Image (tube, grey):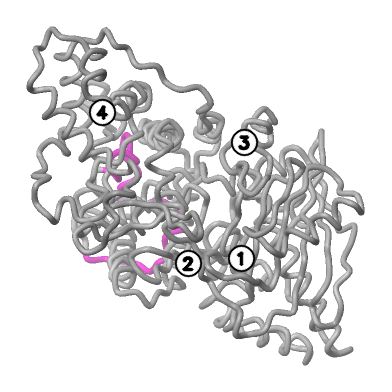
Amino acid sequence: MTSPSEAPVIDRRSPDAVMRLERMGSFHQCRLSFMRTLLRRMKHEGWTFERPRFDIDANGVGTALYSATTPTRTYTLVAFAHDLPDDLRSDRVIATAWDTTFALHDGEPTEADIERLRANVPLQEAGRVSGSELTLSRANRSVRLWSTVIDTLAAGHQPDAEAIESVGYLMRTTAVYGSGKFGAADRQSIADRPELLAPFQAEMLTVYLIRTFVMDLVEHLAAAASPAAVALDPALRRRFGIGNSTGLGMAPFLLTHPRLISNWVAAREEALFRVRAVEAPSDDETETFRRFVARARRGVDTWHSDHPLQQAKIASLTEDLRLLTDHLSTHHGSTDHRSTDHLSTGAHDDDPLAVSHPWDALIRWAEASLSVEGQELVVSLLLEPYGHLVDDLTATMHADESAPTPIDGTLPIAEVKARLASHYAWAIDIDWGRPAADARAWYVSEEKLEPRLGERHDEPVGEFEQPLQPGRDAARMFDALAAWDDTDQLGPFLRSHPEHRHIARRLFVLDQAPYGEIRDNTIADDMLPIDLLRAKLSFFGATHFDPRSDRWVRINMFRGAPFPHELATADPDGWTYPPVSGSSL
């Protein structure tokens, strides 16, 4: 053991290290992810679930209701199933028809509510919901699995497990709108409810109930097709999640909500800090970690993508996990290459976890030995044995963004420049006169009112640019301040240069939100928007990232999670990685 005088110096990772797009684009789900937060609350509070209506015909058309009742109130998913021709099925935001459409209603809907929703929800953006609805959503069937699974069940057989693993869902959502969009309840009107205080809980509940509806619908259609039909084996059933297709519309969120994003990342970094500070893990904690490493290897083995960028990351992660397995099984360069199964047999004489502060040592080893993708997976895996240390941090991940941050106009210019240099040194050093550095412009499309990313030097988009390039704007403000005396004040400067007011306000936000700024150029010619998407979706709890281009990605949600009828007796956390042979998890 290390003596107290030799104890390592452990600190939280800095924003300069964490808030880089390469690293953010390598984040993985963890115990603090919003899906897991929701399931833990459901389990702890004993939520009850009902299916008060399932009026679906043999063609899969009709209406269904799914309710979730907390200790104080009820939420109801109102689902409309449609007979959509194959040629109308699309992942694109420009789609106008879907296989299924949904709204999450606040309470138990009346017949009048259902008819109102029936007239609007299938229209999605073209319709409107009310303040009695929390979300609006839609989903399409998986072309690869939908008919195959129904036909197989109808014939009295279980579907092929390998096919299920390769796809992982039977329907894929293309949007889950909330927070006031299209007439839904504004975030502020529900944020005081304990079950909705954590971020995106209404949206996660919507997807969780959609998953239940989809599985019920598939079994219903199989039974309608044949009296010999069988239900899905429960273990196979859990291997279906809900797919999702997400594009550029999500990306600006990380730039426009610095307080919220900082709270997310700060919670994750605090969790890692707490675990690294553990001096001597228990046998159960080390055993749990070893099991999750084995399960993570299984998860990566089932992670498929056709995109070259993701294929390279998966290959790198596969090698990282091999190195991690070897490091945990042998120490100091030993050539004893034990199999993954031996990870669960306990510590060895040369076990690298049988030292003082082993998790800190493991992080240092990962930073020296693994890719960024592998390093971030290790971060997530290290949190798995430590719910008692880290789960309380989910209560810190929301933010009240309703009140604007005031600007102190008396701040001396010298202090303003110091703050700019502290938060934006990386941006001040960029040569913004190079076309490659100022290559793109964020704007909002006229047709769909959705964020888009245009090529500034090839398209006439500059005049429509949104303020989503804080690095460049901070560098411009820093240059403009050079003409002012250090003893001058910020207020007069902003009266002369109001174009810099948004960065001045951002400086005051970042003083309380150290992880609130992405420390990379968001308009560079080589910027990958999918890194922004991956970062946000990892906090949701998404898995199996599958980019379809550098601007949109498919994911899986709630794959492996217990269904509502299983939750009372199931582990609300043990579903996030697939089980390995011989494991009960």
Q: Are marks 1 and 4 in contact (CB under 8 Å)?
A: no
Q: Are marks 1 and 3 in contact (CB under 8 Å)?
A: no
Determine whether 494 is above or below 229 in the image: above
Q: Are marks 3 and 2 in contact (CB under 8 Å)?
A: no
Location of mark 2 (residue): 554
Taking the image as shown, residue 304 lies to the left or right of residue 211, namely: left
Taking the image as shown, residue 233 lies to the left or right of residue 416, namely: right
Taking the image as shown, residue 304 lies to the left or right of residue 471, namely: right
Q: Nearer the viewer, mark 1 or mark 3?
A: 3
Q: Quadrant of residue 459?
A: bottom left
Location of mark 4 (residue): 500
Name the residue at 60% across, 71% down.
169
Q: Quadrant of residue 300?
A: bottom left
Q: Residues within 10 Å of mark 1 (few under 14, many from 20)?
A: many
Location of mark 1 (residue): 241
Dot 1: what SS?
Answer: strand
Taking the image as shown, residue 359 lies to the left or right of residue 398, namely: left
Q: Are marks 4 and 3 in contact (CB under 8 Å)?
A: no
The part of the chain drawn in magenta is 335-363
Determine whether 111 is above or below 385 in the image: below
The amino acid sitting under disc 4 is: His
Alpha-carbon span between mark 3 and mark 2: 26 Å
Label located before the other in sequence (3 or 2)? 3
Location of mark 3 (residue): 187
Residue 70 included in the magenta stretch of the image: no
Determine whether 412 is above or below 327 in the image: above
Q: Is residue 361 visible?
A: no
Alpha-carbon span between mark 1 and mark 3: 26 Å
The amino acid sitting under disc 2 is: Arg
Label located before the other in sequence (2 or 1)? 1
